Image: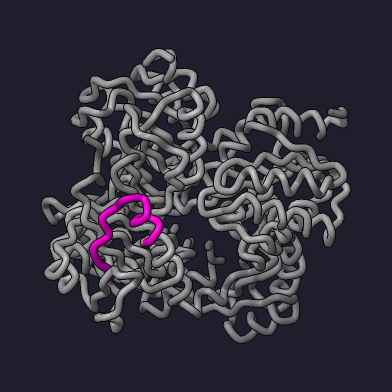
Amino acid sequence: MDLLEYQGKQLFARHEIPVPTGIPARTVDEAVAAAEQIGYPCVVKAQVKIGGRGKAGGVKVAANADEAREHAEAILGMDIKGFTVYELWIEEASEIEAEYYAAIVFDRSARAALVMLSTQGGMDIEQVSEENPDAIATLHVDPLLGFQPFEARRLAFDAGIDADLIRPIGDFLTRLYETFIAEEAMLVEVNPVIITPERKVRALDSKVTLDENALFRHKENAALRDPSDEDPQEQMARDRGLTYVKLDGDIGILGNGAGLVMSTLDVVAQYGGSPANFLDAGGGSKADAITSAVEVICSNEKVKAVLFNIFGGITRCDEVANGLIEAFASAKPSVPFVVRLDGTNDVEGRKILADANLPGVYTASTMNDAAEKVVALAKGESL
Amino acid sequence: MSVLVGTDTRLCVSGITGSEGSFHSLNNRAYGTNVVSGVTPGKGGQDVEGIPVFNTFHAAVEASEANTAMIFVPPPFAADSILEAADAGIETIIAITEGIPAHEELRVYTQIKRMPGVRLIGPNCPGVLSPGKANVGIIPASFFKEGNVGVMSRSGTLTYQIGNELAQKGFGNSSIVGLGGDPIPGTSFVDVLELFENDDQTELIVMSGEIGGDAEEVAAEYIAEHVTKPVVGYIAGFTAPPGKTMGHAGAIVSGSKGTAAAKAEALEAKGVRVGRTPTQVAEIAIEILGG
């Protein structure tokens, strides 16, 4: 789960990482009140989960209340690379002497946290790493030992940090690592880390991604989930305990197990179709899960045909068949379905479907056969 | 022979008194797996259809000489249970549990790697089946028979699909190893490639990968250097968009990394033939081994 800049900064503040003072605002009036409280100059910052806000005009300095109002009016509701601005962060203006970059990433390939530090902050770090990889000092942390003070010093020296800042930057990195571990983040990134004329270190921005699997023990973070982030179908699926990812096409897909569903999408694409979604009904899919899945898939108006691809392991094909009959009774889908049932209780499942003789439901004997049929149906051809 | 589980497996199940845990333990026993004990803290002294339950792994290992553990407890307790099994001297730990937090998984992975002789399979995996010998986990064994094809996969049901395609063409399996769909699996393709390479029964290796991470790319390098047996690959997720997790916590394309196309290319560059559909995997297997 990605956090907004100000949510990340509030997380940082809890772990004593220095951040500029600020107040979030959802309306123009709230923004002006926040600016009055913080004093001038202050910065009005768009809160969206995408980079490049400054270039898009989403970050403006206000010298007085009129300017704060003007900027808030301009930025609220603005579209930044497809993300609408619903929230602002009004922050005290910072004096900047230098801009650094610091980040900690959960590096799955190396099976360790990767700490990165560079004096070339404020710009696109991927560009820095391409053009001048030596400008970024990196180090992997032993997951059982944790981040050691000598490692922080080594990074700071390797990055070419000024002597008087070796310790403050080291402290900053140590706290960032504490935040990464305590909050169970997959990423904490600060770009830029600024050095003020008084030689103080501060986080001027934040990018934080949290581990969804760990949210059960971080209630405060779990509460930051923003439903407006999610597509309505994805939200509906989540509420019903299904894994659903919306795609651009017109063929609804349901399967059991993530790998099989991914494979089904690929096979449909190979037959010239375009999948409308990924939906994993999960292991042991019961009848009510199937009903929910049909409702979620068919609530996407683009869907012209649906493919059910089930290989029963824990999932029993007779339960899937019964679920489909219930779903047809309650959701009354108007598009054709192709159903392929194999695995546990497949003979029973196929018989249940044959006996029910549902309108617009076709059966297929293999995955390839199913894909071919559903692609034809989505094109409006008859079988 | 077979790999990881077989006739000398002595299984202890963590979470054996739960509904899923008991169901699958009994299923595994019915298949012929030697299920010798279970662990549920506070329920020591009870039994599940004759399988004795202990409070700790240490007590279970002492009393039942278990050498293999299956972890079936919910995510908040699973990492702890894996570490307990390892500490008690279990050599092969198969973790079925899905949803273990990433940081915990990383700490467990690191600790297990530092314990010589201990191996973790999973988490978030369907287990390991050696047809005709033993089944540990939730793989529906009735679809598979004994044979010479070793299968390893990051996904459960996709393994069944590929196994079924092979079975329809007449192939059986030495072992089917579910590695799991998490970002930090305890055992990777490379580890199992080594086991299959050294296993007499295995004549062909099928490797079923998916988007995310670089396990397939690393395996491609290893195959070129160390594997003499033929390997057939499959990669799921060619149509997956970047930045979206496709069901498995580990299945995500980040930036240009971890795409299915890049993985297939890496394997093909090292001479591994990659089937574009599960059916094609079986067809390539026939070409290599003869129908």
Indicate whether residue B29 is drawn in magenta. Answer: yes
Whole-percent x, y for residue B256 in the image = 49, 36
Q: Residue at x 64, y 84 (%)?
A: A36
Do we see residue A188 in this rendering?
no
Residue A30 in the image: above or below residue B147: below
Q: Position of residue B223 (x, y in %)?
A: 28, 25
Name the residue rendered at 60%, 72% in the picture: A89
Residue sitting nearer the eye, A147 or A135: A147
- Please provide the residue range marked out in magenta: B26-38
In this orientation, which residue lies closer to the viewer: B72 or A142?
B72
In the image: residue A60, left or right of residue A304:
left
Q: Is residue B66 visible?
A: yes
- Residue at figure coordinates x 69%, y 57% from the top left: A290
Looking at the picture, how far across and down is residue B97, in whole percent?
Answer: 40, 61
Location of residue A273 by image quarter: top right
Q: Is residue B3 magenta?
A: no
Q: What residue appears at the point 25 percent right and 81 percent down from the top-left corner?
A: B45
Who is closer to the viewer here, A178 or B188? B188
Q: Relative to A1, does residue A90 appear above or below in the rendering?
A: below
| Above or below, A48 relative to A25 | above
| Quarter of the view holding residue A303 | top right
Give above or below for A14 relative to B285.
Answer: below
